[in-house]
């Protein structure tokens, strides 16, 4: 068996789909740039924290879906939590033996965090057990940043925008340790499929009608069903468009939508692995303001209608895109449907302008740049 030249440990957690998608994008790019490097992706919170703290990330879906007010309260309150607070200290002390075991078993030459809560838990332990091993953080939010992204001993920080860099610099870290690159997304988003017609056929979409893609992150959260019903009714009357709906890991939503007799063409999809192909095959996106989805859609030049956002971390993402002309914020399903019909019909010119503004926000080389810099932290 060939011996790996170096080992990289990427730490994420399965709260939503974005952190895992970013981790996989970085791993794939390491494979391309440095095939000899062994990359391991680990859920540091669910699989390596002490019980019952490791159960908390599992309640994320429930909180953001069912009690968003409580999630917002937690997000806002924890912004002011200091690392020296008793609860925060207790979590770190209780988790320390497990984190130590993880680092000993993985023996990494570089640790990369793509989750804000990982930093303060892991970086101090790494500094004790392997002080020469670099710890880097890749921020995977776009417009709102929880302070935990920027604390906890991260030596090298990758941020998506200049605004994020400004916030990071206000915490007193040196400019040279902050790199503005964009969000890491899978390389295929930058490569349109050779045939759009073939891509459409692969997802059950017709070649002759404009297509709106409706989704709600990796877990299919938010009023996705209501939006699809409203859009299908409007497009059924108008006859000028079709819908692809991605239910992600939300099996209940998929079953519910599979059972509907639609008045317009609707392709109901579960978890889609080839999301780049699907985005390139569509003309408009309706989504919650997930940072991963936005980064991907802008690279594809897909205009965005935001139907909502997870309070706290996604709020700033809406402004980030809307202020730059790449999208609009419309909460009511019926109003979204009206906008879709209009953008596919009399307002087609506005759709084209939005598409160009969206494309201008895309950072197709973010992952390549981030991995090239991370690679520089490894021995040659
Ligand atoms: N995603 C995917 N297949 C699906 C649904 C979502 O690959 O069926 C990916 C999507 O392309 C994006 C991520 O899941 O990379 C969602 O991340 P985002 O930050 O938008 O939202 P989150 O799920 O973290 O709330």
Image (cartoon, rainbow, N blue to C red):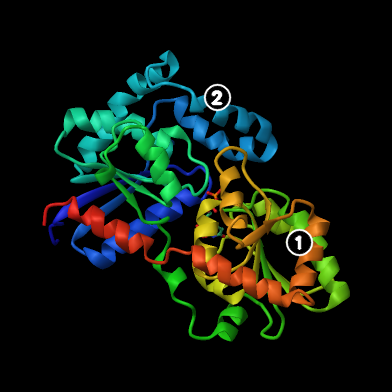
Residue 165 in which image quadrant: top left
**Quarter of the figure that contains the C terminus:** bottom left
On the picture, is 225 further left or further right than 104?
Answer: right
- Disc 2 is placed on an element classified as helix
Percent across and percent down for residue 201 are: 61, 81
Percent across and percent down for residue 235 are: 82, 72
Instruction: Report if residue 303 is visible in the image.
Output: yes
In the displayed structure, 219 sits above or below 75; it is below
* Front label number (1 vs 2): 2
Instruction: Report if residue 261 is visible in the image.
Output: no
In the displayed structure, 309 sits above or below 356; it is above
> Which residue in the structure is indicated by mark 2?
77
- Disc 1 is placed on an element classified as helix
In the displayed structure, 366 sits above or below 320; it is below
Percent across and percent down for residue 234 are: 84, 68
Pick the residue in front: 356 or 219.
Answer: 356
* Mark drawn on residue 228: 1
Residue 113 in which image quadrant: top left
Pick the residue in front: 235 or 303.
Answer: 303
């Amino acid at each position: 068996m060939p011996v790996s030249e170096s080992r990289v440990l990427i730490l994420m957690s399965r709260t939503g789909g974005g952190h895992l998608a970013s981790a996989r994008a970085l791993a794939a790019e390491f494979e391309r740039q440095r095939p000899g490097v062994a990359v391991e992706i680990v859920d540091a919170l669910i699989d390596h924290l002490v019980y019952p703290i490791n159960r908390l990330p599992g309640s994320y879906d429930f909180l953001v879906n069912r009690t968003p007010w409580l999630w917002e309260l937690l997000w806002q309150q924890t912004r002011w939590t200091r690392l020296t607070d008793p609860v925060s200290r207790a979590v770190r002390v209780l988790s320390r033996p497990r984190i130590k075991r993880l680092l000993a078993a993985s023996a990494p030459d570089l640790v990369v965090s793509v989750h804000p809560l990982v930093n303060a838990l892991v970086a101090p332990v790494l500094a004790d057990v392997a002080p020469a091993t670099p710890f880097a953080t890749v921020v995977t939010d776009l417009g709102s940043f929880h302070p935990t992204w920027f604390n906890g001993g991260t030596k090298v920080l990758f941020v998506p925008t200049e605004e994020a860099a400004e916030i990071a610099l206000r915490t007193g870290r040196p400019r040279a340790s902050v790199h503005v690159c964009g969000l890491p997304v899978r390389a295929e988003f930058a490569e349109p499929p050779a045939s759009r017609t073939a891509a459409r056929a692969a997802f059950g979409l017709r070649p002759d009608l404009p297509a709106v893609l409706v989704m709600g992150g990796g877990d299919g959260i938010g009023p996705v069903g209501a939006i699809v019903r409203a859009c299908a009714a409007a497009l059924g009357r108008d006859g000028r468009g079709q819908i692809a709906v991605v239910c992600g890991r939300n099996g209940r939503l998929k079953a519910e939508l599979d059972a509907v007799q639609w008045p317009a063409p609707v392709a109901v999809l579960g978890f889609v692995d080839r999301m780049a192909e699907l985005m390139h095959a569509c003309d408009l996106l309706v989504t919650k303001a997930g940072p991963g989805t936005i980064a991907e859609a802008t690279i594809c030049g897909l205009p965005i209608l935001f139907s909502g956002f997870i309070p706290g971390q996604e709020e700033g993402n809406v402004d980030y895109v809307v202020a730059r002309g790449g999208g609009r914020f419309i909460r009511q399903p019926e109003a979204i449907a009206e906008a879709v019909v209009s953008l596919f019909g009399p307002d087609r010119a506005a759709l084209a302008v939005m598409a160009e503004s969206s494309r201008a926000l895309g950072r197709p080389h973010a992952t390549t740049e981030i991995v090239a810099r991370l690679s520089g932290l490894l021995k040659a």
